[in-house]
Amino acid sequence: MTGTDGEYERLLHWAYCGEVFGAVVVRELIDSRAYPAQATPLQLFFELEDTTRQGLEQLVEPDRLVAAGEQARIEGLRYAHNAARLSWRDLMTETATMSGAALPDFHRLRQLGPSAASAILDAAVEHEECLLRFATLSSAGDQPGADNTIRHFLETHPGPATTARTPGRGPAV
């Protein structure tokens, strides 16, 4: 394995874990009713994260899925507990900051990825760009514009047709 191969595998693992983390955080915020006035945006946010998680999951080595996902799930639950204390605006500002910081690594992942994975990796980059726009518009008070950003992404990237899964736990049983 070359250094570039190792970098690709590391970034793929990081991206997958990030999507498990994100899906778990948002699902927990929905289930705890932390932001009742933002039920629709949270559901869209969850669909964005989970669609990307499902796509990336197809690229991760099966023996790494459960262990990587379980750690990200635990971290996501911990983060959601603290995030529920933030205002919606502060949560979206924090989300925009994290997404903006992650975007260069998503671009690098796409650059290093095999051509056979290009559709999934392109969608992962577009997902992160979408998340950044969503969070930026949400924190600025333009929730309809933010929601439409995700709706457009989901219309153009409906995600893989896979068995329903619990984030970080492999196939649902």
Image: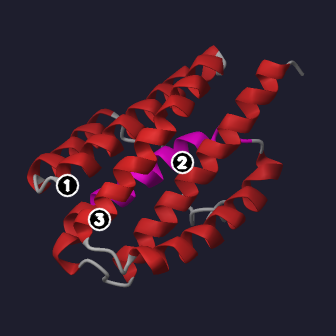
At numbered mark 2, what does the secondary structure look like: helix, strand or loop?
Answer: helix
Quadrant including the N terminus: top right
Q: Residue at x 35, y 49 (%)?
A: 96
Dot 2 corresponds to which residue?
54
Dot 3 corresponds to which residue?
90
Judged from this view, the residue extending furthest toward the bottom is 32
Q: Whole-percent x and y of residue 36?
A: 21, 80
Residue 93, visible in the rendered structure: yes
In this view, 135 is above or below 154: below
User: Which of disc 1 and disc 2 is earlier in sequence?
Assistant: 2
Judged from this view, the residue extending furthest toward the right is 1
Q: Bounds of the magenta span?
A: 44-60
Q: Main secondary structure of the magenta part?
A: helix
The amino acid sitting under disc 1 is: Ser
In screen coordinates, is 44 left or right of 161? left
User: Which of disc 3 and disc 2 is earlier in sequence?
Assistant: 2
Q: Whole-percent x and y of residue 136?
A: 24, 47
Between label 2 and label 1, give the one nearer the viewer.
Answer: 1
Question: What crowding class fits label 1: few (fewer than 14 Cα within 10 Å), some (14-19), or many (20 or more)?
Answer: many
At numbered mark 3, what does the secondary structure look like: helix, strand or loop?
Answer: helix
